[in-house]
Amino acid sequence: MVASFAMLSLTPDNSVVVLIDWQERLVGVMPEDVHADHLRKACILVAGARAAGVPILVTEQYPKGLGHTVPDLQAALGDAAAPIEKRDFACSDVAEFADQLERTGRSHVILAGMESHICVFQTARGLTSEGYVVHVARDAVVSRSKRDYKAALGLYDHLGCVTTSVETVVFDWVRRAEGDTFKAISRLVR
């Protein structure tokens, strides 16, 4: 499938970031080096969204058992978003999430989170079926195994999602090498 210009074009006005289940007890089962790199990128995505004025939605899968969003991401989020507790794997199946997403009025959803092949995939599937343009930041999603991560990337392609990178997303929001938002985002990626 060839993506259209409109599908590939991210602006602060058409975008919303969804951070899925990046929780304390899930971290321990992730490959340490991969997790560290992808967490750093997820923090850049969140901070970049805040700098560009892009709304952020955060979910936590059964926080009583899996803990809350990891401290690094909580720090990056600040007061930008209160986590939505869920039991469904697909965020799109959670009424509170669906309501908050609809209220943003945004058409392009950038996904980051855990696990690539379960909650992120099922959310991508649900959102594409609802007509959203879904971008998956492949350097800000993680799975316990490389095999599952690769399977998820293939599934995103089959759904018609845009697989992208955090830097592609944040620099698409600014478009020009000038201004306060550009300076803030440039500092994030150094």
Image (tube, rainbow, N blue to C red):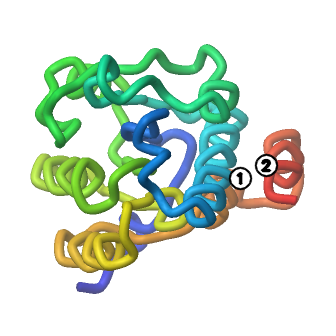
Residue type at the position of mark 1: Val
Residue at image position (28%, 70%) is 152
Q: Which of marks 2 and 1 is nearer the N terminus?
A: 1
**In the rendered image, the vertical position of residue 141 relative to residue 138, given as above or below:** above
Give the number of marks: 2
Q: In the rendered view of the protein, which quadrant contains the N terminus?
A: bottom left
Task: Tell me what residue is drawn at x 67 percent, y 34 percent.
Answer: 72
User: Who is closer to the viewer here, 12 or 71?
Assistant: 71
- Name the residue tied to disc 1: 174
User: Which quarter of the picture shows residue 179?
Assistant: top right
Q: Where is residue 26 in the image (x, y as percent from the top left)?
A: 41, 42
Q: Which numbered mark, 2 or 1, is in the foreground of this view? A: 2
At a point 55% along the width and 50% down the height, the residue shown is 11
83 up-or-down from 101: above or below: above
Image coordinates for residue 111, horizontal then vertical, percent: 40, 50
- Foreground pick, 67 / 77: 67
SS for tag 2? helix
Q: Is residue 16 visible?
A: no
Residue 145 visible in rendering: yes
Question: Viewed as shown, does residue 98 lie left or right of 180?
Answer: left
Determine the residue located farthest toward the front in the rendered image.
28
Q: For the point 65% across and 44% down, which residue is it?
A: 43
**Three-letter amino acid code of the residue under disc 2:** Ile
- Quarter in which the C terminus is drawn: bottom right
The answer to whether residue 149 is above or below residue 121 is below
Q: Are marks 2 and 1 in contact (CB under 8 Å)?
A: yes
State the mark number for residue 185: 2
